[in-house]
Image (spheres, rainbow, N blue to C red):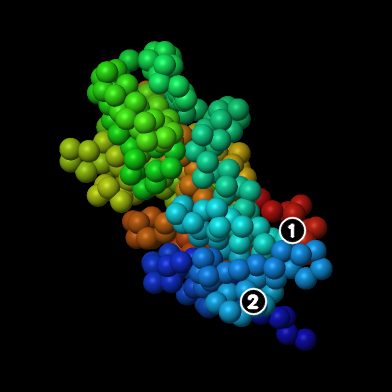
Amino acid sequence: MPERRLRVALLSREPNSYSTKKIVAAAQKHDIEIDVINTTRCYMNITADNPAIHHQGKELPYYDAIIPRIGASVNYYGLAVVRQFEMIGSFSLNNGAAIGAARDKLNAHQALAKAGIPMPVTGFAHSPLDVKAMLGIIGKAPFVLKLLEGAHGRGVVLAETMKAAESVIAAFRHLRANILVQKFVAEANGADIRCIVLGNKVLGAVQRRAADGDFRSNLHQRGKIVKVKITKKERLLAIKAAKVMGLRFAGVDMLRSDDGPKVLEVNSTPGLEGLETVTGVDIAGEVVEYVARYARLPAGVARRKRA
């Protein structure tokens, strides 16, 4: 008797994006039935007897697995949808708890620090009265100020002096915005490294370089991207950082400092276009194969075997 085709849901509000199209094409190549589901058009029946998910007026069928690509702007509702799929029994590439933990930047930094992951010295304070003392703990200017709610390099400011840092923090606190403050790693020369981690391996890595006159290397801020060879230490650090956050698939960003690599962020929904284009690695294909492998296992076996 032929094996039943796997059914996978790709949770994304961007059906025409590069990442969505590549994942859909990879699934079809592997003879997997795949639907693109807009999380904001889902509504849920949260009951013990008959939990269900509806999408644009129709009850969705059972999916063996889901691939969440939840945007930060709909994080709260998107994670509720992911948890509902998990409650029904679908395998999730990244589960809701891990995505939520990684999206909470303060929580993520604390979890990484607790696990011994090296990071730039980072500070956080609530009261404006404590800002100067907190900056003193970090060290001398310049400082990198990061909005906890920021993404794609937005909400990241370089403060050249102690006074400038105090002024920016005071302004954001007046708007009730929370800011992380980090020591500026000058020797990185405006470049960082993104490693794409899947399970127990790094699929590929690129170096992102800041545009002229900027210090942010993020591609959304017009940074440049080139292929890079990472060291064994960097590879193991990327894998460990993803595991600490509970992510099976992640983009781990790090800096090269004088005293070794330092993790900046662990992203639960990394884009595929830049890294696939530069490295030639079929990340979408690897992701689909990973999901198919674990979605086919009985639930208990899958939990024991997953990387």
- Under circle 1, the secondary element is helix
Q: Disc 2 marks which amino acid?
A: Leu
Residue placed at 51% from the left, 34% from the top?
Answer: 106
- Under circle 2, the secondary element is loop
Could you tell me which quadrant the N terminus lies in? bottom right
Residue 84 visible (yes or no): yes
The foreground one among 71 and 28 is 71
Residue at which label 2 appears: 60
The foreground one among 267 and 14 is 14
Q: Position of residue 173 (x, y in %)?
A: 39, 30
Residue placed at 65% from the left, 78% from the top?
Answer: 59
| Up-down relation of residue 225 to residue 26 (above or below) | above
**In the displayed structure, does residue 249 sit left or right of residue 272?**
right
Packing grade of label 1 (10 A; few <14, some 14-19, many >=20) is: some
Residue placed at 43% from the left, 71% from the top?
Answer: 15
Mark 2 and mark 1: Cα distance apart in space:
24 Å
Q: Position of residue 107 (x, y in %)?
A: 56, 35
Residue reaching furthest to the bottom? 1
Q: Position of residue 153 (x, y in %)?
A: 34, 44
Residue at which label 1 appears: 302
Q: Disc 1 marks which amino acid?
A: Ala
| Up-down relation of residue 139 to residue 119 (above or below) | above
| Up-down relation of residue 93 to residue 4 (above or below) | above
Q: Quadrant of residue 185?
A: top left
